[in-house]
Amino acid sequence: MTYIWTGLIFAAAAATEIGGSYAFWAWLKLEKSALLIVPGLISLGIFAILLSRIDSAFAGRTFAAYGGVYIVGSLVWLVLVEGKFPDRWDLLGGLICIVGASVIIFGPRPA
């Protein structure tokens, strides 16, 4: 159950971080309303809270593992929000990153 819970928290953290960052992207790059900053900041705050819920003794280890999840989440965002499909190199890179993230977060640790 811990693996499922960790995966769900990481997925939610990725969604909130990418969504919050995209709000700023939309404002600054797509010339959307500056009011997007408000939900963007809220989303980024939720992201920080979610990431602190990961069961790990060290923040650095959690952040390192999350990096791989963020990359895969960004590729999912690319498809679902931006309507562009990743190429084979994007997919291979995402696979490598998620395997690395899994090794970091779920690798056996000495007691």
Image (cartoon, helix red, strand yellow):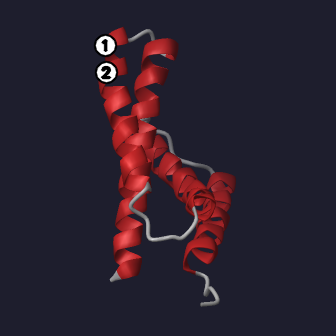
Say above or below: 68 vs 19: below
Secondary structure beneath dot 2 equals: helix
Residue that mark 2 sits on: 38
Residue 15 appears in the figure: no
- Where is residue 59 shown, x and y percent of the image? 57, 59
- Where is residue 77 shown, x and y percent of the image? 44, 44
Say above or below: 16 vs 56: above
For image coordinates 52% across by 58% down, the residue present is 69
Q: Which amino acid does label 1 sit on?
A: Leu
Residue that mark 1 sits on: 35
Q: In this view, does 70 lie to the left or right of 19?
A: right
Q: Which of 54 and 10 is in front in this view?
A: 54
Q: In which quarter of the image is the N terminus?
A: bottom left
The residues tagged by marks 2 and 1 sit, at their Cα atoms, a distance apart of 6 Å
Say above or below: 88 vs 99: above
Find out whether the residues at labels 2 and 1 contact each other: C-beta distance under 8 Å.
yes
- Where is residue 64 shown, x and y percent of the image? 63, 59
Q: Nearer the viewer, residue 38 or 30?
A: 38
Q: What residue type is labelled 2?
A: Val
